[in-house]
Image (cartoon, grey):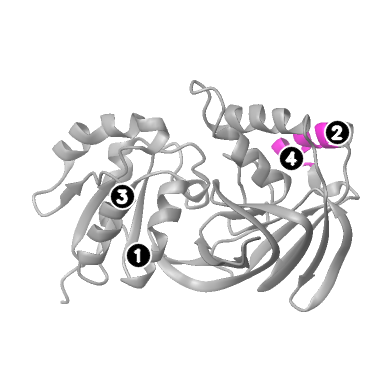
Amino acid sequence: MRPGPQRCVLLNPHAQGGRAAALLPRLQAALPPDVVLHAPRDLVDALALLQKLPEGSRVVAVGGDGTLNRWLPALLQRGHELGVVSVGTGNDVARSLGLHGRAPLASLVHALNADPRLMDVGCAEWMDPQGREYRVLFLSSFTAGFDSAVVLRTLSGPRWLSGMPRYAWAALAELAHLQTWRLDVTANGKHLHSGPALFASSLNTPTFGSGMPATPAARTNDGLLNLLLAGEFGRLGALAMLPRLLTGTHLGHSRIRTRAFETLTVSSDPDLPLAADGEFLGYARQLKLSVLPGALAVVGI
């Protein structure tokens, strides 16, 4: 019988506003002798640890969507298996895996020992206004437009707000500065939209923004991403749409469209704000998205 992969736990002490660090003693006490717990100080240390691990190791990440996003390139490059202990603000990846809301110690045991399954990964490529090229991978969502402006605004939100309430606060605050963009959108070579739009976001998971059921039909293992396109909305229309987005009833609106795709291109005027897995990235006028089918082995339910 071939031995199992090397196992380790990486805890992001900065996750959930630094509150994840309090889990260190409990997780350490629960670990079997052959599993090492690391709490890297920053992204550089975390990526160095992931690079040093033997290829195909089982890495249990303790953090949220942003943690997984930043560690994703190294996980893929080394062919590591991913387990998740959900400790973050959004946690939409954990939701898609059936893990959100589980107690940390129960999640740890499951993440260390359960069999993995393959999960799709999204890839976004663009050039910023200064001509610099970017390529970013994502597990849950890549937002473009209003959604990304909301993400940027959450960074200045009240520290005592987290999860869905923090996103709702930022969305309401952003409505006061509401902007639309003139977008050209093409999916799988078929032109879908030309004209003003509030956002053109792409999801791998059914939810984003800390549990909003944006694309309920999305599956993380079907080799597809899912576009959520919102046309032109004024402040009152956007305000009326927010409760529908929170409850998943937005899909019946005439200015909301969804489309499963393998490749997507978006052109924008003016510069379009971007975010991946709840992390603000900057701006672009030309954007290309694609899916990497079954690229990551991940432990779910």
Residue 74's label in the rendered image is: 1
Q: Position of residue 263 (x, y in %)?
A: 67, 74
The numbered dot on residue 264 is none
Range shown magenta: 238-249
Q: Is residue 45 left or right of residue 285?
A: left
Name the N-terminal-most of marks 1 and 2.
1
Q: Residue at x 70, y 70 (%)?
A: 264
Residue identifier under label 4? 245
Residue 110: numbered disc: 3
Which picture quadrant has residue 122? bottom right
Residue 52 vs residue 107, the one in the foreground: 52
Considering the numbered disc 1 on the image, is that residue within a helix, a strand or a loop?
helix
Q: Residue at x 51, y 46 (%)?
A: 95
Q: Amino acid at mark 4?
A: Leu
The kind of residue tagged 2 is: Arg
N-term-proximal mark, 2 vs 3: 3
